[in-house]
Amino acid sequence: MRIGDTPIRTVYSVGAAGLAVGAVTLIFVLFSGDEPVRQVVVPRVEGPAAAAKPTVLPIKLPSLPKATTLRTLSGTLSPVVGTVTDAKAAIAYSKLGGPWSIKAAPPFSAGQRVGAARLPRTTIASSLLPGATPVAALKTDADYRKAALTAVRWTIRNHHPAGSKVAWTASQKLATGKGWVLGYRVTYAIRGRKHTSQAALALLDIGRRKPAMLFVTVPDMHRKLWADIAPLMAGARAL
């Protein structure tokens, strides 16, 4: 059978070939319009360990006064019922009776406390000087005074409410040997109300590169115990 001058078999063959070419062309057109394949970079999500560390604000302390004796504040003296011997810090000091009681006080090696451990706490505690061992041995009063100042800054950061302010109440030689004592009043706000703690810190020479530290702080809710601070510091001694 013929269509005009062309055999029908030839017409079918040409038509089939045309359809095949059309299909290939269509596929090419469809896919050639796609965007090139691009590598997708997934942002790396840092874990908690890589999170930005909060800024630690410096603790600002006023200049130390000239030699000033730590005086006994008004209140009621607690009974002395024995001696606390802190073998790790190599010092001894008064063990006070009620309302004081012996309590663990990490990171200190020995402690006494009244009430709860939450801030602002009422505590007596001893240990070696926190932090790194001094590069050079402490020899002079000025050496011990400077180290005591650093230790007070540590107590404000770690053992008083945030935002605490310091006013000095004493700066004197240790009564029982080589060392230094600083007394300070700490003010802070709790739920919008102003409060005060009375505190003192002593550094004691124990014959090692790192001295011992005795620290006491008493908030105004226990103001009657403020009277215990000066006698406690006066009796602290190296073993």
Image (cartoon, rainbow, N blue to C red):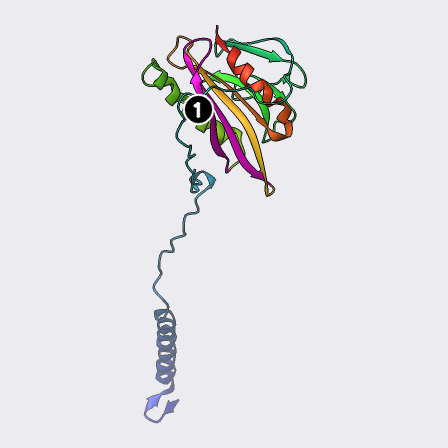
Out of 67 and 115, give the one closest to the viewer.
67
Q: What kind of element bears circle 1?
A: helix
For the stretch drawn in magenta, the main secondary structure is: strand
Q: Can you say whether 153 is above or below 108 in the image?
A: below
Q: Position of residue 172 (x, y in %)?
A: 43, 18
Out of 34 and 2, give the one closest to the viewer.
34
| Amino acid type, residue under disc 1 in the picture | Ala
Q: Position of residue 229 (x, y in %)?
A: 56, 19
Residue 112 is left or right of residue 207, and the answer is: right
Would you name the residue on which mark 1 appears? 151
Name the image quarter holding residue 196.
top right
Q: Can you say whether 105 is above or below 187 in the image?
A: above
Which residue is drawn at the image coordinates 43% and 8% (left, top)? 177
Out of 187 and 150, give the one closest to the viewer.
187
Q: Can you say whether 82 is above or below 147 in the image?
A: above
Which residue is drawn at the image coordinates 48% and 12% (left, top)? 89
The answer to whether residue 227 is magenta is no
Q: Can you say whether 119 is above or below 25 in the image?
A: above
